[in-house]
Image (cartoon, helix red, strand yellow):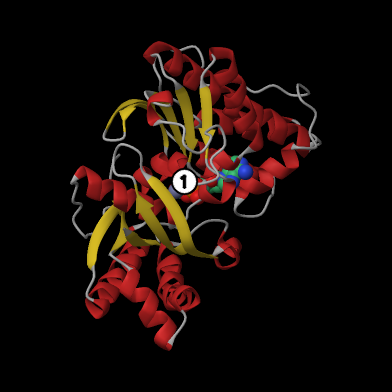
Amino acid sequence: MIILGIETSCDETALAILECSGGIASPRFKILKEAVASQVAIHRPFGGVVPNLAKREHLANLPVLERQIFGTGATAEKLWKKIDTIAVTVGPGLEPALWAGITFAQELAKKHKKTLIGANHLEGHLYSFLLPGTTGRRPGTPLSKILPAAALIVSGGHTILLRVQNLKKWKRLGETRDDAVGEAFDKVARLLDLPYPGGPALSRLAESGRQGAIEFPQPMLHTRDYDFSFSGLKTAVLYYLKNNPKADKADVATAFEHAATGVLATKAFRAAKEIGARSILLSGGVAANTRLRRHIGAAARKLGVAFLVAPRRYNTDNAVMIAAAGYMSLLRGKKLPLRAKGQLAI
Ligand code: KG4
Ligand code: ZN
């Protein structure tokens, strides 16, 4: 089955075409085409994503990406003939941005007489371990060696820990009670005068900081639940900078990153142990963070379980994971209404 995925939930406009096979027992994905247009430069002067600007940019970028992927004339027609269905992100995300993708997908579906299905952005992140190039899984490894799993989804809007029983069934173990971890990275980056998007910039700065020079509290590390909290950590950084105006910013970045990623790894470790997981799955934009990958990798080794994470370009928002989530929705017989739902849950 060939699926065109469309993603516009935040500040990346993305299209991808995937060949999907294997069914629910062992889904396989071959990436045929992919294109992403980042809006980083547009939002940078504002220090964050401006929803209506994002919508305008998506509307401008979508036809450009379509041409980039399909070409024109006979080439485009030939490729369109191969497409079986279109999958578009319906949530969660910024509603004006989501609508840009949904209306564009509806126009394409009508013009080319294709079916259209809604995809859940968080399911896209969750299923990203099924994509080609994932570390920790050799091609052909059966799912029975991976599941049940403890899955951590860490992005700009979410911090969720799940127990994944199989590809159809999971349970929420815990989540953040305030800021998402990506949001905390972005806010702390701003405190350090780093440019938007803060996460990657902070992470680069943290590479040159001295480990242990400063220590920040690890919020909720010792609570028995699987919830997280990151706003107190951000406030701790704020006060530290106020009281130590001459502080080495790289040391501050290292200490923040160490505290934030350490608590994520500790809770993922505990969850994996308690549920008898065969693996830990890591996804979402913050999964691109090297220190987090290192911490979780160490936790998984200590437990003797696998650690799976998709290549970095499929951690941050992309349409490859959306086409994959669309395929999984079809297999599960799940139909999402084609309406933007900002708070759609996983
Ligand atoms: O999944 P994603 O691309 O978009 C959402 O669904 O939110 O995640 C974006 C988040 C942002 O907060 C960004 O700062 C963070 O992921 N991020 C990182 C890194 N790369 C992206 N945070 C820490 N280290 C990184 N290398
Ligand atoms: Zn995302």
Looking at the rendered image, the quarter that the C terminus falls into is top left
Most foreground residue, 202 or 339: 339
Query: Does residue 186 appear in this view?
Result: no
**Relative to 179, residue 18 above or below:** below
Q: Residue at x 43, y 41 (%)?
A: 130
**Relative to 117, residue 56 above or below:** below
From the image, tell me which residue sits under label 1: 131
Residue 8 percent across, percent down from the top left = 40, 61
Residue 239 percent across, percent down from the top left = 64, 31
SS of the residue under disc 1: loop
**Relative to 1, residue 127 above or below:** above
Looking at the rendered image, the quarter that the N terminus falls into is bottom left
Q: Residue at x 59, y 18 (%)?
A: 301
Mark 1 Cβ inside 8 Å of ligand 2: no
Q: Residue at x 53, y 18 (%)?
A: 266
Image-quadrant location for residue 117: bottom left
Most foreground residue, 155 or 305: 305
Of all residues shown, which one is farthest toward the bottom?
A: 73
Give the mark count.
Answer: 1
Image-quadrant location for residue 159: top left
**Relative to 295, residue 33 above or below:** below
Question: Is residue 237 found left or right of 58 in the rendered image?
Answer: right
Query: Does residue 79 appear in this view?
Result: yes
Most foreground residue, 245 or 73: 73
Label 1 crowd bin: few (<14), some (14–19), many (20+), radius 10 Å: many
Residue 72 percent across, percent down from the top left = 44, 85
Residue 111 percent across, percent down from the top left = 25, 80
Query: Which kind of residue does numbered mark 1 sit on?
Result: Leu
